[in-house]
Image (cartoon, rainbow, N blue to C red):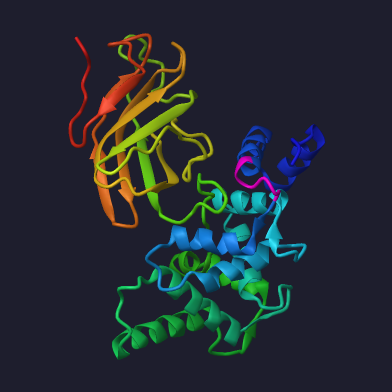
Amino acid sequence: MTSLTSKESNQLSEETGLSKLSIQDWHKRFVQECPTGSISKERYINLYRSYYPRARNSDTYAQMLFTAFDDDRDQALNFREFLRVVAVSQGTDEKAKLELAYKAYNRNQSDANLTRKEIQNAVMAILNLVETKDDTDDNNDTDKRQTTIDWVMKRLGYEEKNEITKKEFIRRCKGDTNLYEFLAFHCVPKPNCPDGDLRGKEKYKITIKTGTEGKKLVLLKASGTDANVYLILHGEKANSGTIQLQNSQTHKDPFEHGHTDVFIQFLPSLGKIKGATLWHTGDKSQGWLVENLMITNEASNTTTYFPVQRWLDSDEYDKKTKVELIPNQPPGYDE
């Protein structure tokens, strides 16, 4: 794949609402990880298996969404189609998320009405995605599933009809927070691992909170940074290697004053996290106050907490922009 032209970047920015800088960054990573220029249906399904490792069955839901994104029906997602995944998943547009969900749940992949059978199949696919393999499959479990199906059908108005329009689907979901959270599409971030190398990877959620205090000597300066931020996790089994923290799941502009940013990484099993190295490459104008860092291995459901509670600032304090961290121990400042 060649680099994007200025015209292509402008068009994609208009279509997705993403900045041209963000699009160029995503394209660079897309080319590195998908040198063929597309993500196959098989790989997309494997991404969901990796993202939901404890799910009963993520394949059906993944296939629904893949079909919704695969506009040209070539059984692969090109960069333009993939960028739609990014735009909708990172965005806050409820209507866009619901329009995508409606398209995915509608087998005709059109504006045709959503039938009772189609929404029942969608609910079952979502339950298979969010329920774990450890959940029992007894009569009580079956009753709980039926209760959920009945609840969705009632909230969508299927008690009075056998199908609903897209307009009604969106209206009812936007008017019911619980219904929206259940039916709005469940996205999967793009993992940082090479094509075909997903086996043995585990999903790690990295959460960083930026502080809210002003600098000691320049009180008007906020605590956030625009610098590039990097992290290495040190585990009992292995180290993560250098991770650049970008594309926050919670904010388009990460590491701002008071923000809590979440990043997803797929890494080999590290074992128990024993430490971390955190740093940025900013200059004197880009000091950063880090409140805390949390690492959650979602495969094992374990969380490691680092109370950082210090500035990474080349201009003040101990002038360090790189710090070694130990779980549950604030690193403090050097004398």
Which quadrant does the N terminus fall into? top right
Of 87 and 270, the residue lying toward us: 270
Please state the horizontal and vertical placement of residue 149, each as a whole percent of the image: 45, 83
Does residue 185 show up? Answer: no
In this rendering, is residue 306 above or below 187? above
Please state the horizontal and vertical placement of residue 3, each as a whole percent of the image: 74, 35
Residue drawn at x 45%, y 59% is: 50
Residue drawn at x 70%, y 65% is: 75
Residue drawn at x 62%, y 49% is: 87
Of 270 and 103, the residue lying toward us: 270
Which quadrant does the C terminus fall into? top left
Please state the horizontal and vertical placement of residue 93, each as a whole percent of the image: 59, 53
Please state the horizontal and vertical placement of residue 218, each as a whole percent of the image: 37, 11
Residue drawn at x 52%, y 71% is: 59
Magenta span includes 34? yes
Magenta span includes 75? no
> Would you identify the image quadrant in which residue 12 lies?
top right
Q: Main secondary structure of the magenta part?
A: loop
**Is 94 situated left or right of 213 in this image?**
right
In this rendering, is residue 224 above or below 302? above
> Would you identify the image quadrant in which residue 129 lies?
bottom left
Of 255 and 48, the residue lying toward us: 48
**Is 202 situated left or right of 123 in this image?**
left
Count of numbered marks: 0
Does residue 216 show up? Answer: yes
In this rendering, is residue 284 above or below 84? above
Q: Give the range drawn in magenta.
A: 32-37
In this rendering, is residue 173 above or below 199? below
